[in-house]
Image: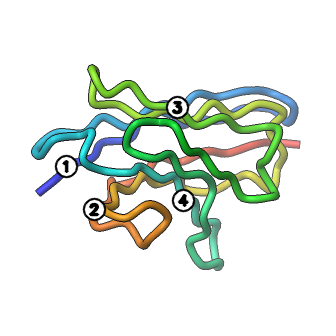
Amino acid sequence: QVQLVESGGGLVQAGGSLRLSCAASGRTFSDYSMNWFRQAPGKEREFVAAISRSGGIITYADYVKGRFTISRDNAKNTVYLQMNSLKPEDTAVYYCGAGVVFRSTPNYWGQGTQVTVSS
């Protein structure tokens, strides 16, 4: 089992920045690729970004490319999502997920952290 705990969400004005963190415990963190997803009210959960086990491969959804940056620190068992130039449409609950296979559906999920961007 892998336990994931997100933090760093909050309320921010459009154009602002937030940094989300996801701390992992349980099994070996570096055995898993890590992902960020988000879910807005009334919408399905959607992919945001993914990073491979070593951090050497990164991919983003088109709607966050150039604004968001995913990174990981395997020594701290933590994955991050730096979010810049936030827009009201970025408002959602953000979830981190740990997956055995890169870009596959995560095997483990955190509880989510709310991000609200005001206009």
Identify the mark nearer the N-term, 4 or 1: 1
Q: CA distance from mark 4 to mark 1?
A: 16 Å
Identify the mark nearer the N-term, 1 or 2: 1
Give the camera-side residue of 106 and 7. Answer: 106
Q: Residues within 10 Å of mark 4 (few under 14, many from 20)?
A: many
Task: Tell me, yes or no, whether the two marked residues, 1 and 2, touch with CB atoms within 8 Å.
Answer: yes
Residue marked by disc 4: 37
Give the camera-side residue of 35 and 109. Answer: 35
Residue marked by disc 2: 108
Left or right of residue 97: residue 56: right
Element type at marker 3? strand
Instruction: Please tell me which residue is depicted at 61% across the width and 45% down the height of the picture.
Output: 115
Q: Residues within 10 Å of mark 1 (few under 14, many from 20)?
A: some
Q: CA distance from mark 4 to mark 2?
A: 12 Å
Residue marked by disc 1: 3
Nearest-to-viewer mark from 2 and 3: 3
Q: Mark 2: which amino acid?
A: Tyr
Element type at marker 4? strand
Instruction: Please tell me which residue is depicted at 37% across the width and 64% down the height of the picture.
Output: 101
Q: Residues within 10 Å of mark 3 (few under 14, many from 20)?
A: some
Instruction: Please tell me which residue is depicted at 31% across the width and 28% down the height of the picture.
Output: 74
Left or right of residue 21: residue 27: left
Q: CA distance from mark 1 to mark 3?
A: 18 Å
Instruction: Please tell me which residue is depicted at 28% across the width and 67% down the height of the picture.
Output: 107
Element type at marker 1? strand
Residue marked by disc 3: 71
